[in-house]
Amino acid sequence: MTRKIIGIALLALLIAGGGLFFIADSFYMRMPKDIVVLRALQAHRETFERMRQMVIEDSNVASMFTGSDLNENLTQERRAEYQRLFAQLPAGIVVTTHKQSARFVFATGGLLSIGPEWIKGVEYLPSAPTDWGKLVDNLDNPSGLAMGNVYLRPAQDQWYIFLQKTD
């Protein structure tokens, strides 16, 4: 009987540890590849552009926009337009305002108390990219990039794939 209890306790710890490992995502397993983000931008460019304009206009009302949680201070028509646009984008994208621009966050990972935190998505940069982060050719190997920086990979025109790593 004691062996069964110990076995069940160890199994529970293993499952909990595995779940915590997945949530923390220290190995960037949930991070989308650059090509996935780039293809989404190419396929939905007009939607990204329209939503970017709207988010900048509405930045005094809210700093974060999701398809399922829109600020009630927006008019009903504006919320309906956001919902229409979100329905055209890949599921789960969160839009935030950032330095007079809009970030389209595709994925996040990490828990600050346990390990690194990261954010990956696309962003339109209205000024020189070096004002916003460090230019790189590829963001598919994030473990090789230093913590505490924003990395940018050119996508189209003034659009960049970004990876922000926070320690």
Image (cartoon, rainbow, N blue to C red):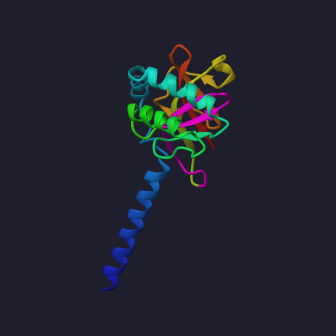
Q: How many marks?
A: 0
- Give the residue at the far bottom of this rendering: 1
- Tell me the quadrant of the picture where the N terminus can be found: bottom left
Task: Tell whether position 100 is magenta.
Answer: yes
Q: Position of residue 106 (x, y in %)?
A: 47, 36
Magenta portion: prevailing SS class: strand
Q: Position of residue 47 (x, y in %)?
A: 45, 25
The residue drawn where x is 42% and y is 34% is 84
Q: Position of residue 49 (x, y in %)?
A: 51, 22
The residue drawn where x is 58% and y is 28% is 151
Q: For the magenta stretch, what is the residue range?
A: 94-113
- Give the residue at the far front of this rendering: 76
Nearer the observer, 157 or 77: 77
The residue drawn where x is 55% and y is 21% is 136
The residue drawn where x is 34% and y is 85% is 2
Query: Eyeballing the image, is 32 above or below 24?
Result: above
- Tell me the quadrant of the picture where the C terminus can be found: top right
Nearer the observer, 23 or 72: 72
Q: Position of residue 81 (x, y in %)?
A: 47, 33
Query: Eyeballing the image, is 118 above or below 140?
Result: below
| 79 with respect to 3 (left or right) | right
Nearer the observer, 95 or 128: 95
